Amino acid sequence: MRTTLSRSSWTRRSAGICLAWAALVLAGCGEGNKAAKGPGSGKADAAKSPLPLVGVSLLTLDNPFFRVIGDTVTSELGKAGYKVVVVSADKDPARQSNQVQDFLQQGARAIILSPCEAKAVVPAIQEANKKAVPVFTVDIPCREDGVKIVSQVATDNLGGGREAAKGMIEALGKAGGKVAILHFKQAESCRLRVQGFREVIEAHNQANPAAKIDLVTELEGGAAKDVSFKATEDALQAHPGLRGIFAINDPSALGCRAALEKAGKADGVILVGFDGQPEGKKAIREGKIYADPIQFPDRLGQEVAQAILRHSRGEEVKPEILIPTKLYRQADAKDDPEAR
Amino acid sequence: MGNAGMGLVLLLVCLGLSLATIDRVEPTGAAAGEWLAQETISRFGDQARVLLVSEAGEQSTQLADGFSRAIGRAPALQSGQVIGDPSDVRKALGRWATEHGRLDAIACSPGMADQLVVREAAMLFPALGQPEILRPAGSSWPRFLGRQNLLNIMGQIAVIAIVAVGMTLVVISGGIDLSVGSLVGLSAILTAAWIQWHGGGENAGTGQMLLGSLIGIGVCALIGAGTGSLVAWAGAPPFLVTLGVMLIARGTAQQLTGGESLAHLPDRFVWLGRGADWGIPNAVILMLVLYGLAEWMLRGTVFGRHLLALGGNAKAAGFAGIPVRRVQVLAYLASGCMAGLGGVVLASQLKSASPTYGDGYELMVIAAVVVGGTSLSGGQGSLLGTLIGALLIAVINNGMNLLGIDPFAQKIVLGCVILLAVLLDRLRQR
């Protein structure tokens, strides 16, 4: 761009870097080739073709929950002779749509999704439908019209919410009291959790007016520690006599706990979370969270892998598979290695 | 020149990826069907017993037709066909086992050959004997260079690349625009909201869709002009002004719909994002036209010269009589406009709009601009470079997906590419 002198030197240097880069890329591909061909390449025999591919695009891989799902699917389908590629959509619907396109391009035989956005994933699923590649969802369902999904595997969040309420009732005992909810309204799963929670609390209030539980407020906790921390501080200001808080996941519950500790109210407020991630289980073991309805990401992964195998075998597959939660208290954490 | 260097890098990366993705590409359609029929006859004679199985995809009818045509030459052959799910195949195999007994071969489409019902057919239905599984022999070809894959790459980067047109102009003027990602989301929401709430939803006409898109783009252009005015007249640092606008635009988009997404859009709304009337996606044509126009504007018009002069040295440009403030406002206006257009294209591609659209795009767009050789200190750069930069990012992303590289490693690689580009930029400056 500037003088001839600097230009020639820049060209030489950049050419060097380019070549180094190309060498790197080429070295990488040499390996890929060998792996893809394997023994006896070149024959047209059916048995020698590469492993069938299953593409998995999950909401995010920053959350250990989804990593467990990805790992379980990989090992379960790996045993059955599939190659599994797991990618993270990083909560970006456009990125997820691209990933589905790339899977179809690679000739994937099945696709597993945790949609970032049920509506935005529709065109991508339709593209897979057009190519007759079966689509499955895990953890997050897609209930839009015009898409064909073989099976949707998810946690029974409604039932989980009910269990959370049972835990709360049992912990509050005869006195009842004021309870707040830390919500994450944009997720259907969390709406179901809160719905189940409210159902059981209302039924309890009708049956035991003396031990009435008052759901005083429902705040946005962002399903994250920082947002929940602030929301809890505000809730404590607005309702000083708070006796319980239901947080819709573990990060939210832990953020809430931090705010309770800061306000010196950690012992007076019962905290019920959701999920049963290692961090949450540890908090339950230490008595920081009273209980969690725990989810089973490994079972979600197993079920969706089984659904693929059943479908491939031509067996019947249920369109919706719900995995129940289990209420997990301090006693359960005592001999759980994950809670350490 | 910088463009030639980056172009070379892009070519080398493409070459590397082509070699790395060489794979058995399966034939489809009639050719595959004919091959299967001939293979059956040559292996098992013209009295073979064969079942053709295929999934009900786009090309399955051609496959079946090709097969029937070729098999018509051997009338003594006993054959059947199933086009459908693995469960249909299972039923058909069961029926064959009870009605005819032994089966010599299962002629499969490539997809069906991998299904367990076929692989385990002999075990599931012992009456079939040991049927041979025939699948069309593939030829070796880099998956990366598949026609559809190359079109996918272009389509996948279209939104980022379109937004990068405006960003290039702003960066050349010596500024930066962090608000573009949020504007993409706002524009998508405004467009979809107009069509869904005022234009008749799924039954909206072309006029309403166009009007909605213009509203989305227009509002973003106005916001861009506002940003530019704050930078030009208030002398506020662009980094902070556009950071503020970024939050305002994102919040507005979320508030308009209460965080929900909008999807009651007509089927024809996807024309811009997913349609391909002339062999390549319409969004890609739009992108290329915009790059042509902008490059011409930068090199061939007074405004372009002013922009370069302004970025080179604002004070000198002012003394030379260049309307510095007006040029600045126009650059941000163009950026807002392109972000708005990007939002419309994204909404069209995904046939829906969510306030989260475009989250983090500003960084990808800036990366494309910088990788393309436009200097962040302003005064020099080119649209062609930005296009190459955007393509490079898209190609690397796509290639890593095709190679099945670990998602965390993908980010590291992309980061290294950006660092490398910055390094090259410094080398060139010396």
Image (cartoon, helix red, strand yellow):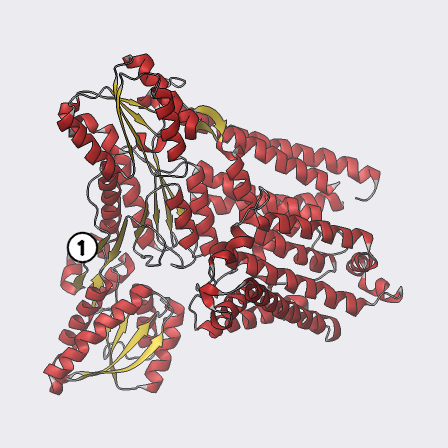
Identify the residue shown where x is 37% and y is 34%: B60
| Residue B334 percent coordinates (x, y) | 69, 62
Element class at badge 1: loop
Number of residue marks: 1
| Residue B110 percent coordinates (x, y) | 36, 30
In terms of depth relative to the viewer, which is nearer, B149 or A244? B149
- Residue B405 horizontal side relative to residue A275, left or right: right
> Circle 1 marks a residue in which chain?
A
Q: Which residue is mark 1?
A: A336
- Residue B371 horizontal side relative to residue A189, left or right: right
Image-quadrant location for residue B421: top right
Identify the residue shown where x is 17% and y is 67%: A163
Q: Residue furthest right?
A: B320
Q: Does residue A193 lie above or below A93 as drawn? A: below
Q: What quarter of the picture does the C terminus of chain A occupy?
A: bottom left
Instruction: Sort mark 1 into few (<14), some (14-19) or many (20+) by Cα contacts within 10 Å.
Output: few
Q: Does residue A46 lie above or below B241 as drawn? A: above
Identify the residue shown where x is 17% and y is 31%: B95
In terms of depth relative to the viewer, which is nearer, B100 or B275? B100
Question: Can the viewer see residue B376 in this picture?
Answer: yes
Question: Can the viewer see residue B236 in this picture?
Answer: no
| Residue A330 percent coordinates (x, y) | 17, 64
At label 1, which amino acid type do we have? Answer: Asp
- Residue A112 horizontal side relative to residue A289, left or right: right
Image-quadrant location for residue A115: bottom left
| Residue B166 percent coordinates (x, y) | 67, 58
Q: What quarter of the picture does the N terminus of chain A occupy?
A: top right
In terms of depth relative to the viewer, which is nearer, B75 or B1? B75
Q: Does residue A187 lie above or below B44 as drawn? A: below
